[in-house]
Image: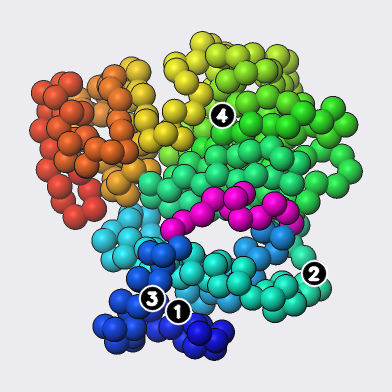
Amino acid sequence: MDAAHFRRLLDGYVRGTLTDAEREAVEAWYDVYPELDDAKVFADGAAASRIAHEIHGRLANHWRPARPRYVGIRWLSAAAAAFLVVGLSWWFLRSESASERIPAMREPAAYVEVVTGVRQVKKLVLPDSSTVWVSALSKLRIPERFDQGARALFLDEGEAFFDVTPDPAKPFLVHSRGITTQVLGTAFNVSAYERLGSVSVTVQHGMVRVSDQRDRVLAGTLTAAQQLTYHPQSQAHRIGEAPGEAAAWREGVFPLANATFDEVSAVISRLYGVETKAAHQRVASQRYSLVVRSTHRLDETMRILCSIHENQYRRAGNEVIIY
C-alpha cells in the first residue's frame, strides 16, 4: 500500500466516508499492530519527538476539536477514531525511509506535549533514561532534549510518576501548578488535577526538595513514604505520611482512604469519562474509603461506592447523580 492510498484511508476513516469493506480493512490492520510502548520502538528519544510532531502535524485538522467539559458517547467515539489514526500513522511513519518520515524542521518546538484521555496511562522514557508514567486526563510538557543545566518538565494538569536517573550536574525539576519539585535521582508522584484544588507530591524512594513560585522552600527533604500537599489558592501546605503506594494507578488500582466526594469524583472521571454529582450537601460532605479498580464496570463501582453510606444513584446523560 503506497503512502497516498494509506493517507486517503486514514482521512476517510475519520470522516466516516469509507465503505464497510475499507473500514473493516483499516480496523483489521490496526489489530495486527497493537499499541506499543514508545520506549520499545524508539531507542532515541529525539527521534520519537520528531516523529510525534510529524504525526500531529499531518493530523492537525482532526486532532484539535474544542475539548468538551463533559465527555460524552459521541466524543469518546471520535477520540477512539483519532487514537486509531494516530496508532496507524505512527506505525506507517516508522515504515517509511528516514528521509520521508523525518522532515527538516526549521524551528523545532522547545517542548513535546503529552496529553492522555479517559482511562489512558502512557509510559515514556526520556532522553536521560528517566521513566515517566502519565495518568489519565493529564497534560505533560517535556523538552525535546536536555542540554546544559536543569532537566525541567511541566505537569500542567493531572498526575504523573517519575523514576529519575541520577545526574548531579543536571537537577531534575517538575513544575506543577505553583510548586517545583527538585531531585537528583529518586522516584516520586505528583498529582495536580485542577478540580481537586491542591497539588500533592509523594516520594516512593530517595528524597526531593519542594518550593513554591517565590522559591520559598516548602520541604527541604521530603523522603520515602512522605507526602506534601499544597493549596495554590491559599498557598498553605502540609507534610504527612503518604496514604499508600505512590502510584498504584499505574496498575489500574485507586485506593481511597477517607477521601472527599471531589476526590472520588476525580477518579471516576479518569476511569469512565463521566461526572459524578451529589444531589444534596449531605452526600457532598461524606467521606469514602474503598478501592476503585479499572477492571470494574461503572455500575459495579457505583454500587460499591453507594453501599458505604447506603446511598442510591441514577444516570442522567453523562452525569451520575448520587442521592
Which amino acid type is shown beneath numbered disc 2? Glu
Q: Are marks 3 and 2 in contact (CB under 8 Å)?
A: no
Which amino acid type is shown beneath numbered disc 4? Asn
Disc 1 packing (10 Å; few <14; some 14–19; many ≥20): many
Q: Is residue 301 magenta?
A: no
Q: Which residue is mark 4?
A: 189
Q: Which residue is mark 1?
A: 10
**Mark pair 1, 3: CA separation:** 8 Å
Q: Give the mark nearer the N terminus: 4 vs 3.
A: 3
Check disc 3 and report its element: helix, strand or loop. Answer: helix
Residue depicted at 51% across the width and 47% down the height: 122
Which amino acid type is shown beneath numbered disc 3? Val
Question: The magenta stretch spans which residues?
Answer: 34-46
**Mark pair 4, 2: CA separation:** 33 Å
**Mark pair 4, 3: CA separation:** 38 Å
**Mark pair 3, 2: CA separation:** 34 Å
